[in-house]
Structures are given as C-alpha cells and as structure tokens.
Image (cartoon, rainbow, N blue to C red):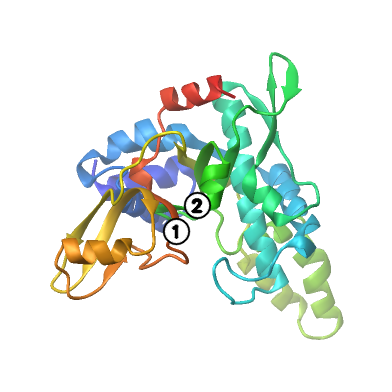
C-alpha cells in the first residue's frame, strides 16, 4: 500500500482530514513506528487497534474539569517564560485531559477495565504525578497498584520526553496522540450554540454584523467531530537502559538524532558530537532541542504497544 492509498483509507475510515492523515503517516515513519514499505501492516496491527474516539459529552467533562483548576495552574510554557493567555491555557489543559479520557476509554473498550482519574481541585504537581486514581477490579474500586502517568501530544509528535522526577514517580508512562486541532475549543462552542445564540447574536444587536454576515461567519466556523486519540504506547521504569542509546544521521556539518531510548543527561549531545566527529550542531529530528536535558527520552517506535504488552500491564494493576 502506497502512502497516498493509506491516506485515503485513513480519511475514509477514521474520518480525519487529508492533511491530518498525511501527518499521521509521516510522523509514524519519522518516529520509527514503521517504514514506507510496511505502512499497511502498521495501520492494521498498531495504529487502528489502538484508537479510541472521544465524543461530545466526554469532551464536555474534560473541558469543564480543566476550567475548574485554571486558577491553580502556572500560565507559562513548560521550561520557558512565555505567558499564555487564559483561553490558550484552557485549551491546552483540555487537550491534556483528553489524553487521560482516551486511556480510560481504551482500558474499558479493549480490556473491559473501568478506571477513573482525579481532577479534583489541587496543586498541578498532583496531576503530573499520577493520573489514574482508581480501577474497578473484581467488582471493587481501589487504587491501582501501578502509578500511571499520561502525556498527550499532537499528531506531529514523534518524541516521548519525560522529566526525570516524573519518570521515576510513575511506574508506567503512557503517550497519547490527540487529533484535537487548535480550533477544538471553538468547535465545541459552536456545537453548544455559544456562537449562534450568544456571540454572533450580540454582534447583530450592536450593529457589528448583519444577519447575513452572522450566518456566513457561523457557517465558516469548523464543526465539532469526535476527537480521535491514538494510544501510541508506554514505557516502564523498572527496566535497565543503556546510556546514549541513540541513532541518527550525519550531514555535511551537523548530526540529526532520529531515535533515542532511555536517559538523557547534560553533556550527552557533546559526547555525540565527539563520537561522530561533528563540527556543527547535534539536533533532534523534528524538534531541534528540548526544554531540558535531564530526564528520559524515547522516539515513538521504541514504545510498548502490542495487545500482549498491555495485557501484562493490566495484570499488575
């Protein structure tokens, strides 16, 4: 199956745009999940079986849960000082919560395990440390025996970047790719008539819009669709990792890291530069650099994702 054929298949079966489908395939290859020759096998065995679809009511719950704790959350980007406005912070937090909802649905739909997460008001560090609060085992709710951390990224993510403290606090770290566009909050507002019955109506009342302009604006706004989530895989902390377990390619001056599995420490990129006799820069494919250099890093192709991998994990819950 060619990339173009798979793009059409994903558009038809998964109900995403052609651009999204192309990105999904491109980043699966870049992340080392597959290669161009084995796209169909990747799609049927890895990608499609690990999908869930988040519907409007569950999206609404995540949106409201995120709103509840906005006042407890720093408005700066992780590792930086750039301030995000409240609307962007709300959208970003909702996207993160959608990753947790995806795991809850995944456990229920694929393995018939009920679980819940904790979005009660508290410090942000509490949400980072453990996302799954309790599971239903043998008809009894209890805390899971494993601490499960969940990180959400977009379709274009190929790296699972985990700060050291977070990696060691969680027994299992899961990466979820969420097909929530940058307009996802707007599509939800359109779905619940915020624009038609409130904003655009006021625009007409104050004379900023004609009735036709209001209708045209409403029609141009993207509509809400169930959010596609790809449970990309997980890593466990109780396995030995090798230092500088990486792969890459050498250019005329620079070196591009295309794979990494395990710890990353200050000075590692300098070692790689020496090992490969590079006079230029050492950068990571698709992102250049990360906001920190002390933690654990994995390309998506190194994650555990098979059904038997999940079954082993579930037995330990």
Tell me which numbered mark, 1 or 2, is placed earlier along the sequence.
Answer: 2
Q: Which mark is residue 294?
A: 1
Expressed as whole percent of the image width and height from the top left, the position of residue 217 reads: 67, 72
Residue furthest to the top:
138
Expressed as whole percent of the image width and height from the top left, the position of residue 209 reads: 76, 82
Judging depth in this view, the residue of 276 and 97 nearest the camera is 276
Q: How crowded is mark 2: few (under 14 residues within 10 Å), some or many (20 or more)?
A: some
Expressed as whole percent of the image width and height from the top left, the position of residue 218 reads: 69, 68
Q: Residue at x 75, y 46 (%)?
A: 119
Q: Which residue is drawn at 47% across and 42% down?
A: 14
Quadrant housing the C terminus? top right
Judging depth in this view, the residue of 219 and 276 nearest the camera is 276
Residue 236 shows in the view? yes
Q: Residue at x 75, y 55 (%)?
A: 123
Residue 54 shows in the view? no
Q: Tell me the element at label 1.
A: loop
Expressed as whole percent of the image width and height from the top left, the position of residue 63 reads: 72, 53
* Tags 1 and 2 touching, CB below 8 Å: yes
Q: Which residue is drawn at 60% across and 64% down?
A: 183
Q: Is residue 211 above or below residue 111?
A: below
Quadrant housing the N terminus? top left
Which residue is label 2 attached to?
Answer: 164
Q: Tell me the element at label 2.
A: helix
């Amino acid at each position: 199956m060619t990339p173009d054929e798979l793009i059409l298949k994903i558009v038809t079966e998964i109900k995403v745009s052609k651009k999204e489908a192309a990105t999904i395939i491109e980043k699966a290859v870049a992340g080392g999940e597959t290669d161009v020759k084995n796209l169909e096998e990747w799609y049927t065995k890895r990608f499609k079986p690990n999908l869930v679809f988040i519907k409007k009511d569950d999206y609404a719950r995540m949106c409201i849960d995120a709103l509840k704790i906005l006042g407890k959350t720093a408005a700066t980007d992780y590792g930086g000082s750039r301030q995000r406005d409240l609307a962007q912070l709300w959208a970003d937090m909702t996207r993160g919560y959608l990753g947790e909802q995806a795991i809850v649905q995944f456990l229920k739909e694929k393995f018939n395990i009920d679980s819940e997460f904790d979005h009660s008001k508290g410090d942000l560090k509490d949400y980072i440390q453990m996302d799954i609060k309790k599971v239903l085992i043998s008809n009894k709710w209890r805390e899971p025996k494993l601490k499960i951390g969940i990180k959400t990224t977009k379709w274009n993510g190929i790296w699972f970047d985990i700060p050291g403290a977070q990696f060691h606090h969680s027994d299992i770290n899961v990466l979820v790719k969420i097909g929530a566009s940058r307009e996802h909050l707007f599509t939800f507002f359109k779905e619940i008539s915020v624009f038609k019955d409130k904003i655009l109506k006021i625009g007409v009342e104050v004379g900023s819009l004609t009735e036709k302009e209001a209708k045209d604006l409403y029609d141009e706004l993207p509509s809400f669709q169930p959010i596609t989530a790809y449970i990309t895989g997980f890593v466990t902390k109780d396995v030995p990792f090798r230092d500088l377990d990486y792969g890459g390619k050498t250019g005329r001056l620079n070196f591009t890291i295309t794979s990494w599995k395990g710890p990353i420490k200050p000075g590692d990129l300098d070692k790689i530069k020496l090992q490969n006799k590079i006079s230029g820069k050492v950068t990571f494919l698709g992102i250049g650099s990360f906001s920190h250099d002390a933690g654990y890093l994995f390309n998506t192709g190194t994650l555990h994702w098979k059904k038997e991998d999940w079954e082993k994990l579930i037995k330990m819950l």
